[in-house]
Image (cartoon, coloured by chain):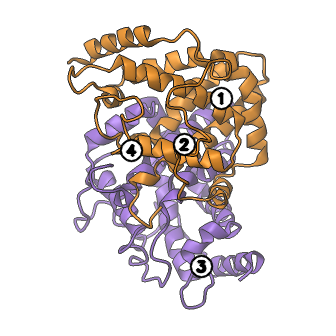
Chain colours: A orange, B purple
Amino acid sequence: MKTNSLAAALMTALAAAAAPNVNAQSAPAVPGYTMGQKSLARAPYTLADLESMKKSMLFTDEDIRYLRMSKAILADQTEAILDVWYGFVASTPELVFYFKNNKTGAPDGAYLGAVRKRFAQWIVDTADANYDQAWLDYQYEIGLRHTTPKKNQTDKADSVPLVNFRYLSALTIPVTTTLKPFLAKKGASSADVDKMHAAWVKSVLVQTILWSYPYVRDGQF
Amino acid sequence: MKTNSLAAALMTALAAAAAPNVNAQSAPAVPGYTMGQKSLARAPYTLADLESMKKSMLFTDEDIRYLRMSKAILADQTEAILDVWYGFVASTPELVFYFKNNKTGAPDGAYLGAVRKRFAQWIVDTADANYDQAWLDYQYEIGLRHTTPKKNQTDKADSVPLVNFRYLSALTIPVTTTLKPFLAKKGASSADVDKMHAAWVKSVLVQTILWSYPYVRDGQF
């Protein structure tokens, strides 16, 4: 399948999968969103480990304040943000590959749509910046869902078995770069937009590092 | 050893290890700097893989131009930059731990000093942004030197056997955040400083991902 037709198929699948209400706060439960549920395994890293990682990243309480400032700004823009992010995935064959339906070889619209609802919730959770044990355990769960055997399981998708490690932390850049204009849309000062953006970079990067745990050899994380 | 006395010991070690000339371009060969040498293993990832990673990070030719613009700005500031970076390591017990001398339990001044000379060269190489096979192979070598069995070998150090994975990509933030004021010191416009900074974030992040290869389980990179 050529890149252009792949992107076109993806766009069609996305349109079909678009939900009328993906604002996680007002929507009913998001399928597969299990933050805080007892079924989750305990994370193999601790809140103290997270604090050490934050310290090594100059990730301070000021960043947490700016993340929370971003919440009200982003809350009613999640669909528009996801349009941009999914457009980027659609136009990047290396990324849309991870949503391929094994039977058709085309992007799996149902799978993309299911992930998209959790992605909307993730925007809100990232802005919330509540780093407790439930949050930590869910980061581990997200990591597991990118790797065998948990990839595809949540959405009963028939897709490739693994998102390659090298794209996890890499996505910090497109996610936060394309977010910046949305941070600027509600009248925040340029300085505040810069600080919200910098806080988002730190938060997404530390999350992707936590998600990487299942990829890393025993004892080396 | 308490944090303060550790930091004090490190500062003393650093002062003792300071080299009179670490401008890599005018200095003689930097010990342990082996970019382009035949002894290096071929990287397990290809230049095409690198291009895909760059694409997923919105890392374009414009970024390369801004990295190269930074070279002339940073070339005579490498010692001052390294003072800031080493000060940050010294004040962060989680990081200076990786330079601990196993016998004394204190930071190893000779080891820190040897790494520092290659770190100065790394600033210049990052600004050069020449992504050829020799550069790629050297990224793999850098990754190996953070993990067992190659850690400590280059400098014959008696130190801890591994830098934990979680600190590699994390260091993208302090390295690039503290670099920004140096980018602004030679009269570049605020817009150009922002663009050089953004290009540095992409370059350091992609490098740390490449360095992570030895940590990642077989077939998952």
Q: Same subunit under labels 3 and 4? A: no
Q: Chain of mark 2?
A: B
Q: Amino acid at mark 4?
A: Arg
Q: Is residue A20 above or below residue B180?
A: above
Q: Tell me the CA gap for discs 3 and 4.
A: 36 Å
Image side of residue A115 versus residue A188, left or right: left
Asked if residue A195 can be seen in this view, the reply is: no
The residue wearing badge 1 is A124
The residue wearing badge 4 is A166
Q: Amino acid at mark 3?
A: Ala
Q: Earlier in the sequence, mark 4 or mark 1?
A: 1
Mark 2: which secondary structure? helix
The residue wearing badge 3 is B17
Quick one: A128 or B125, which is closer to the camera? A128
Q: Tell me the CA gap for discs 4 and 1.
A: 25 Å
Between circles 2 and 1, the one closer to the viewer is 1
Q: Residues within 10 Å of mark 1 (few under 14, many from 20)?
A: many
